[in-house]
Amino acid sequence: MQRRMDENHLNIAEVVELLHSLASSTSPFTFDVEKQRLFFTDDDDVPCELTLPRVLPTIDGRNMEEIREQIEKSHQTYTIILIQAGAAAMGYYEDRLLRQHKVVKKYMVRKKQGKSQIKYLKSKGKSRLGSRIRLQNTVLFFEEINATLGAWDVSEKSEAILLSVPINLKNLLFSSKIPPPFDKKDPRIKRIPMDVRVPTFKELKHVDWMVTRGTLRRGRDRDGGR
């Protein structure tokens, strides 16, 4: 039977309020720790699922009260890193307030082809002056990103590190002469589950709004449950 899912975005306070109301319910629930997703039924016996906000540390409570308490005790201290070829936007947040931010831009894309210097070098080499400049900018691009993150001391402070970066650029991020202040397999690193536009301060704020929201989906039969 086909189902329709009603979807709502809840801020952290609204997530806590919902969990508090569910704590007194006798309805069974399951919690997927890996996906940070809670499954339950509401008062109308409609199946629901709640995905917790990405900025939270990994929650592993065994019941509604423990889940709620862990969320309330979190400091909501996190770092958002958005990277595309030639553009990056980063922000460090404490208690949901933006404390540090920076946008980095470098000439890394060939204007006519729109191809990043990384991909171009694989087929054409680096003999021309323009290619050498773009290659040098690529090196400086990742060094500046990692130097900035190191200066912010995000490794010590962040409960979550939200990262959006293509695979080929991710490898360069972690192989830079100036390494990032966290390991490639750091358990705090979380993928940003949305399409990110060219990184700018405006896009950083948009992504921040999304990752600080939980997603509540409420299922209902298309015929109204009949």
Image (cartoon, rainbow, N blue to C red):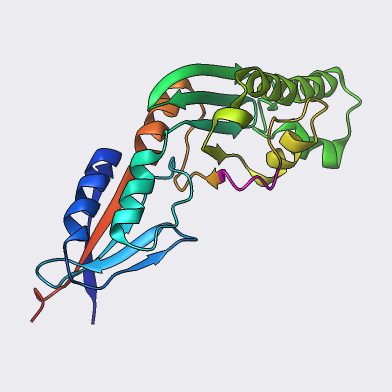
Residue drawn at 71 percent across, 30 percent down? 180
Q: Quadrant of residue 216?
A: bottom left
Q: Nearer the viewer, residue 21 or 6?
A: 21
Please give left or right for residue 94 compared with residue 180 in the image. left
Magenta segment includes 224: no
Q: Tell whether 146 sits left or right of 14.
A: right
Q: Quadrant of the N terminus?
A: bottom left
Write down the quadrant of residue 118 in the picture.
Answer: top right
Magenta span contains residue 185: yes
Q: Quadrant of residue 138?
A: top right
Residue 15 x, y percent position in the rendering: 26, 47
Instruction: Say if 53 sits above or below 64 in the image.
Output: above
Q: How many marks?
A: 0
Which sits in the foreground, 106 or 101? 101
Q: Position of residue 61 (x, y in %)?
A: 40, 58
Q: Position of residue 214 (x, y in %)?
A: 32, 47
Q: Residue at x 51, y 37 (%)?
A: 159
The residue that appears at 24% across and 77% down in the rendered structure is 2
Q: Relative to 71, is 78 above or below?
A: above
Residue at the image position 63 percent from the left and 43 percent from the top = 166
User: Split into 4 quadrants, where in the image is the C terminus?
Assistant: bottom left
Task: Name the chief secondary structure element in magenta.
Answer: loop
Front-most of residues 116 and 16: 16
Q: Residue placed farthest to the right in the image? A: 127
* Image coords of residue 84 (percent x, y): 60, 33
Please provide the residue range marked out in magenta.
184-189
